[in-house]
Image (tube, rainbow, N blue to C red):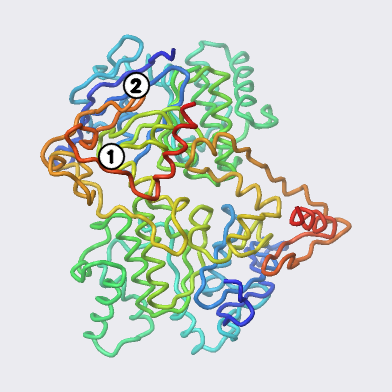
Amino acid sequence: MVQSILSAKDVVIKFSLRGRVLTAIRGASLELYEGQTLAIVGESGSGKSVFTKSFVGMLDTNGWVESGSIVFEEQDIAKFKGDKQWSTIRGKKIAMVFQDPMTSLNPLRTIGMQIQEVVELHHHLKAAEAKKRTIEILTDVGISSPEDRYSQFPHEFSGGMRQRVVIAIAIACNPKILICDEPTTALDVTIQAQILELIRKLQEQYNLTVIYITHDLGVVANVADQVAVMYAGDIIEYGTAGDIFYNAQHPYTWALLSSLPQLGIKGQPLYSIKGTPPNLFNEIKGDAFAPRNPKALKIDYVERPPYFQVSPTHYARTWLLDPRSPKMDPPETIKHMREKFVRYSV
Amino acid sequence: MSQTTNRELLIDVKNLRVEFNVKAKEPFVAVNDVSFHIFKGETFGLVGESGSGKTTIGRAIVRINGTAGGDVMFKGRKINGDIPKALDYEVTQKIQMIFQDPMASLNERAKVDYIVSEGLYNTKAYKDEGERKAKVEAALAAVGLLPEFASRFPHEFSGGQRQRIGVARALIMEPEFIIADEPISALDVSIRAQVINLLSELQKSKGLTYMFIAHDLSVVRFITDRVAVISKGKIVELAETEELFAHPLHPYTRSLLSAVPVPDPIEEKKKRAIYYDPLSHDYSVHKPKWVEIRPGHYILGNDPELEEYNAMLAK
């Protein structure tokens, strides 16, 4: 049985912006299982980065966790205040890899120093030992001739190699959880494939639990054990990769899958979601996706749906799962995916 | 679309070479001996990794980058190098470009009205203010934006809307050929579909020809008729889209195809990535040639390699 390592419940995160208050996360809940990979998908502005940043206390200074709990190692880290408390978790237990390897490294220091700094701080090693450990880590992330690379600067590395260095810094203190925020978006597809494989290898070697934040459903299919779909600051559907790809229940997940060009038929218009996501400054009533959903029910505009359980692993926030709702089938384009669901479950 | 023989050629690129740092002893060759043609009304895809030279080819066609050799023919006339001013005028009108990042490609301090009519101002392609206004309105309507948006600034729009402004700016010149340089890479999944649909609607209604530069092969497969794969400034394979996806021959093409993630966990988890080593080609004895290995399917390879490719096709 897989064990839960981090559990977020009804988290509400707010930001104050030019005198107005914006609700970025509206009561999202999440369960993270040890050793597994969770992918969080959603459009830009859906709150996927903000939500995970609250796990490491890295919200911008104008943001705060209003309510809810994030339990990690029997502590409610949502209540943490100040860097002193956070430094016991951030980097040490939960580390983060960011999107752009061009900006997340210090251009003025050698990459060896940047990794060694972490090793010295967290493992309390002396310089010579720390260097040895740094070179080991460089080898682990697949950088060839690490002794020479140790004393080079970020500009001497290609984009893919730089992302490997960023990953090296993140794993240098043996974290339990690794959060990868769009780690491959800025990279070419062939490099992307290599980085995904590297993270998978490290996951086994370092016994990591990984959270991927991405908008690319192809990447999700590649890496994910669990998938959380975010829309307008809320997790609207949560399940195993098979649940989400082959047995999706929420109209937004349907729309997301149907608009993939891989499923489109050449020469015919691609399915597209009308309109834009809601403005989070305004209060959202009912199902946030209802205004863009042509088949929305009346109740979708009135009351926010609770989580309905589809299977022990699969939850969705949609009134369609209420026994009183009319039966609605997913769009034609993704119906054939259902057949694979049986194969996947076996 | 296999009746390639009697179709009208719009763009014909022959042995194109583009160099940077021309004054240096050894200039950097960004595009090396590239040849392809684009038929009227089709969507031609150009795929490759960053730094492969795909954008440079696009920019060389619209005369942003100078060429160091070869010819670019537009409707049978040479348009690169020194050309008469009148032809230059015509080319800059008839060939338009759409850029990747709608956040960076619009002037933040200009209103949409100015952004969209900038081409008109430069070519003075309007009689009076009334005609210009009407043209702006028509261009905005064609991309699904309201006429009152003309008086707004770019920051008031979402990413998808901004990309529509970029398309309107190209359309107002009544182009025949549009070079779309990664027009949807910076957009969200749900907005992507809207822009793809818009581009194909416009192609049908206005009879446009596209050159679509991209690295996302799933999108390329969906919208292009023919695709060229480019690596390190050279086109290594060119074929009709379905042919290329069904029978990829060049190791670089195969590695690209294997690297694209498929949104299907079962397929994706059993997939194996193929790595491409550019040094694996031994061109010391046999020089590589650009050969039509099957009707419409071109590939770069030397004799031993071509034999191998033929064997793969025979299977």
In this view, B308 is above or below B262? below
- Secondary structure category for the residue under label 1: strand
Structural distance between the alpha carbons of marks 1 and 2: 22 Å
Amino acid identity at mark 2: Pro
Which of the numbered marks, if any, corresponds to residue A246?
none
Q: In the depicted view, which residue is nearer to us: A82 or B180?
A: B180
Q: Where is residue B201 in the image (x, y as percent from the top left)?
A: 38, 69
Q: Where is residue B240 in the image (x, y as percent from the top left)?
A: 60, 65
Q: For residue B150, which quarter of the picture?
A: bottom left
Q: For residue B4, which quarter of the picture?
A: bottom right
Chain holding disc 2: A
Q: Position of residue A272 (x, y in %)?
A: 33, 55
- Residue found 23% across the figure and 57% down from its top: B156
- Secondary structure category for the residue under label 2: loop
Q: Where is residue B279 in the image (x, y as percent from the top left)?
A: 76, 48
- Residue found 70% across the figure and 55% down from its top: B249
Q: How crowded is the residue under tag 1: few (<14 C-alpha within 10 Å), some, or many (20+)?
A: many
Q: Is residue A194 left or right of residue A174?
A: right
Residue at the right extreme of this rendering: B285
Chain holding disc 1: A
Q: In the depicted view, which residue is nearer to us: A301 or A211?
A: A301
Tell me the quarter of the image containing the N terminus of chain B. Answer: bottom right
Check disc 1 and report the residue beneath it: A231
Q: Which of marks 1 and 2 is nearer the N terminus?
A: 1
Q: In this view, does B168 lie to the left or right of B71?
A: left
In this view, B155 is above or below A245? below
Q: In the depicted view, which residue is nearer to us: B296 or A82?
A: B296
Amino acid identity at mark 1: Tyr
In this view, B203 is above or below A314? below
Check disc 2 and report the residue beneath it: A312
